[in-house]
Image (cartoon, rainbow, N blue to C red):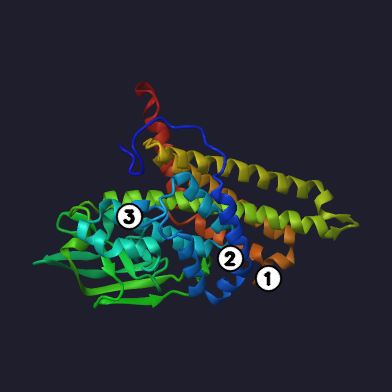
Amino acid sequence: MTSTFAPGGPAAEPDPPAQDRAEFRAFVDRAVAPYADEFDRAQRIPEPLLREVAAQGWWGAVVPVEAGGTGMDMVTLGDLHEEVGRGCSSLRSLLTVHTMVAWALHRFGSGRARQRWLPGVASGELRGAFCLTEPEAGSDASMVATEAVRDGDEYVLDGVKHWITGGQSAGLLLVIARTGRGPTAFLVEAAAPGVRRTPIRDALGTRASMLAEIRLDRCRVPLHARVGPEGGGLLVATGALDLGRYSVAAGCVGILEACLQASVAHTRQRRQGGALLRDHQLVRAKITDMVTQLSAARLLRWHAGRLKDTGDPETLTATWIAKYFASTSAMRAASDAVQLHGASGCGDGHPVNRYFRDAKIMEIIEGSTQIQQITIAEQAFRGLPPGERS
């Protein structure tokens, strides 16, 4: 299988974080992390911050410089999404789905589609959302019920997409629909006739990611809005989801670091039984686990990013592994962080409360923990010598 991210070549060992990481961290510490709990309560990211993100060039991270983007390599993209995830998982989620749309448009979009939409997508003036999940089919691209019927020089789309991150505000929707030849990807302008979106509020986690239900009712799109060939939607979706899975893995590393920072700060000043919490052995055991899981998750994410940058097809499995380990580790770390903070960690508005809720979402999106266990194990069985396979 050929990588969809870079030319082929041998995988290299992970490099240290790019120098850009310090800039990412400084921005997040200034403009994101101090306000993340406010965003969570308001259940949206304010538009001025989204414009600041655009000024940083982050919406166009995977779009080449010559096409108006930033042209980040995958390791640096992971650094970015890790730092943003440390500050606010909801903002990272918006970056994730937009990045998926930008990648698909640049790689598979028609010339007219790229000319029409890519400049706005690269600049962040036009933000994207990935519309795959449905009420019945879930995120199985092969089973989508949304239909696209050819009518002359247009397609007519009908269907419902649910749990769409960024769906309340996105201007461009990447929709996976079924044609006579199978699942197919289309670009749909959110302002087009026949598109109706309904906000979804009070989700367990990533509450500021502006979730929505998207209904398509006799929505017409031009031929050039098709992304790839008819029946090629699985290829588009697989590549986009792999990129999204990589971003989620990076974001989970960010949650891990945020949990560690909060737990260290709390246990260094909170006393119980006449001693600082940090001096209790059981507390130190939890901190040790967080440190170790953070280091391992970051290395797995770097490894997956390097494989993407060198075009190694093993990046797909490496990304599954990175996401599986990072998401389950983030959930454990968030649970321990709440435990260490006691009652205060359970209160609405405390950061570790948000980390806990967001971490649970990470175990579900872009491939649930159980799906990952099935997929990773299957890869292991395929790797056994023929005589040892059952």
Amino acid type, mark 2:
Val
Dividing the picture into quarters, in which one does residue 99 lie?
bottom left
Quarter containing the C terminus: top left
The nearer-to-camera label among 2 and 1 is 2
Can residue 356 be seen in the rendering of this structure?
no
The image shows residue 274 at horizontal and vertical percentages of 91, 57
The residue furthest right is: 274
The residue located at (78%, 56%) in the rendering is: 267
Q: Earlier in the sequence, mark 2 or mark 3?
A: 2
* Mark 1 neighbour density, 10 Å: few (under 14) some (14–19) many (20 or more): few
On screen, 342 above or below 80? below
Picture quarter with the N terminus: top left
Please tell me which residue lies in front, 35 or 336.
35
Q: Which mark is residue 32?
A: 2
Residue at image x 56%, y 63%? 88
Disc 2 to disc 1, C-alpha distance: 21 Å
* Secondary structure beneath label 2: helix
Count residues near mark 3 (Cα–Cα under 10 Å), then give few for <14, some for 14-19, many for 20+. some
Q: Which quadrant holds residue 349?
A: bottom right
User: Looking at numbered disc 1 in the image, what kind of residue is underneath it?
Assistant: Gly
State the mark number for residue 347: 1
Q: Which amino acid does label 3 sit on?
A: Ala
What SS does tag 1 mark?
loop
Q: How far apart are marks 1 and 3 (CA)?
A: 46 Å
| Drawn side of residue 110 relative to residue 255, left or right | left
Q: Nearer the viewer, mark 1 or mark 3?
A: 3
* On screen, residue 200 above or below 75: below
